[in-house]
C-alpha cells in the first residue's frame, strides 16, 4: 500500500492552483449542484474552490495528514471534512446523506475496489444526480515519470499508448466517446500506487449500471502554467492531436435502478 501520510505528497498537492482544476470545475458547474460529495479531497484545494461557488461540500479522504492540513486552510463553513477509507466495505455509508453530485479528482485510480465504490455512488445520489469524474487515461500514460522503472516498461507503455490512441481514433473522437459498442477494456498498470483503465472500461461500466453518459472528454491537462494551459486548450481544437488525449473527464447521470424483469407465473 502506498503511504498517503507523507509531507512530500502534501507539498505536491498544495502546489496546485485554481488553474489546475479549471476543466473539472467547469464540468461540475455545468450540472449546477448545490450539495456535493467529494471523494478523495487531499489537501482540500478543490473543496475550497467549490465553496467559493457557494456549493456545500462533504469531502472525504483517508489521509489524516491531508485532512488536518485541509481543515486548517479552509475558512468556509460550507465545507466539512471526514476521514473515510474508500476501499473499505463500509463504502460511502459514512456520508449518510444524499447529494446532487459526487465529484472525484484523480482518486479512483488509487483504489483497489473502484467498481464497488462506483456502484455505491449511485446510493448517495439524489434522483437524477450526477457523477463528475476526473481520472487518467490508461492510453495516455505513455512516458509519465512515475510509471517508468525499466526500459522494457517504457517500451510496453509506449506500445500500449500507440495502440490505445489508434483504437480511440478508429472508434470516435475522444471528446465524443459516449457509446461503447464493444468489449470491456481494462489493464492494470505496474506502478505501486495506481491502477489505470482506458475510457472504454468506464463507458462500459456506466452502460451496464444504468447511467446516462452526459459527456466524456479525454483531452484535459492539469498544469500549473497559464501559458501551457492556453496552448493545450488551443491544441485541443486540432482533431489529429485531440485523439491522442490527456486526462479523462466524465459526466454521468444516474438513471436509477433498472427494473428487474418480471418472472412469469407458472401456469397451473
Ligand atoms: C492524487 S491525490 C488527489 C487529491 C485531490 N483530489 C487533488 O486533486 O489534489 C489522491 C488522493 O486519494 C486519497 N486516497 C487514496 N487512497 C484512498 C482511500 N483508500 N480512501 C480514501 N482516500 C484515498 C489520497 O489520500 C489522496 O488525497
Image (cartoon, grey):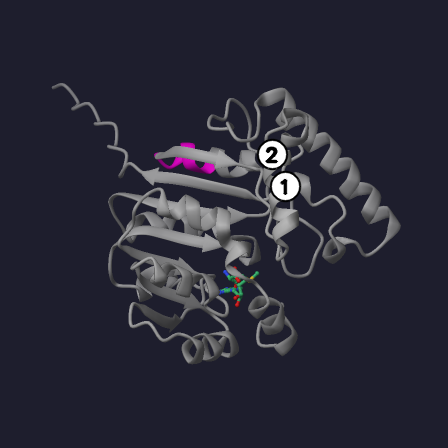
x, y percentage for residue 152?
Answer: 86, 47
- Does the magenta segment cover residue 209? yes
At x 69% / y 45%, what residue is drawn?
141
- Does the magenta segment cover residue 54? no
x, y percentage for residue 190?
Answer: 71, 53
How would you classify the magenta stretch by its main secondary structure?
Answer: helix
**Snapshot quadrant of residue 210:** top left
Q: Is residue 119 above or below residue 240?
A: below
At x 22% / y 27%, what residue is drawn?
263
Is residue 94 left or right of 217 when viewed as pictured? left
What quarter of the picture does the N terminus occupy? Answer: bottom right
Range of magenta residues: 205-210
Q: Are marks 2 and 1 in contact (CB under 8 Å)?
A: yes
List the residue tagged with mark 2: 236
Q: Is residue 268 above or below residue 6?
A: above
Q: Secondary structure at mark 1?
A: helix
Relative depth, front residue between 115 and 167: 167
Any part of residue 3 in sight: no
Amino acid at each position: 500500500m502506498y503511504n498517503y501520510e507523507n509531507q512530500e505528497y502534501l507539498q505536491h498537492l498544495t502546489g496546485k492552483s485554481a488553474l489546475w482544476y479549471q476543466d473539472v470545475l467547469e464540468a461540475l458547474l455545468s450540472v449546477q449542484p448545490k450539495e456535493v460529495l467529494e471523494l478523495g479531497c487531499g489537501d482540500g484545494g478543490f473543496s475550497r474552490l467549490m465553496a467559493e461557488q457557494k456549493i456545500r461540500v462533504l469531502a472525504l479522504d483517508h489521509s489524516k495528514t491531508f485532512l488536518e492540513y485541509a481543515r486548517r486552510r479552509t475558512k468556509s463553513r460550507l465545507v466539512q471534512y471526514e476521514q473515510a477509507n474508500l476501499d473499505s466495505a463500509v463504502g460511502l455509508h459514512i456520508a449518510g446523506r444524499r447529494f446532487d453530485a459526487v465529484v472525484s479528482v484523480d482518486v479512483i485510480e488509487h483504489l483497489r475496489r473502484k467498481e464497488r465504490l462506483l456502484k455505491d455512488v449511485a446510493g448517495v445520489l439524489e434522483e437524477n444526480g450526477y457523477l463528475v469524474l476526473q481520472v487518467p487515461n490508461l492510453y495516455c500514460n505513455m512516458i509519465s515519470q512515475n510509471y517508468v522503472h525499466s526500459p522494457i516498461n517504457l517500451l510496453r507503455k509506449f506500445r500500449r499508448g500507440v495502440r490505445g490512441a489508434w483504437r480511440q481514433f478508429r472508434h470516435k473522437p475522444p471528446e465524443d466517446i459516449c457509446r461503447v459498442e464493444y468489449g470491456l477494456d481494462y489493464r492494470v498498470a505496474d506502478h505501486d500506487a495506481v491502477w489505470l483503465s482506458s475510457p472504454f472500461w468506464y463507458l462500459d461500466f456506466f452502460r451496464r449500471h444504468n447511467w446516462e453518459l452526459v459527456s466524456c472528454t479525454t483531452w484535459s491537462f492539469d498544469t500549473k502554467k497559464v501559458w501551457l494551459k492556453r496552448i493545450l486548450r488551443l491544441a485541443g481544437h486540432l482533431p489529429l492531436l485531440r485523439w491522442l488525449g490527456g486526462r479523462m473527464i466524465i459526466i454521468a447521470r444516474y438513471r436509477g435502478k433498472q427494473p428487474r424483469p418480471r418472472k412469469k407465473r407458472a401456469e397451473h
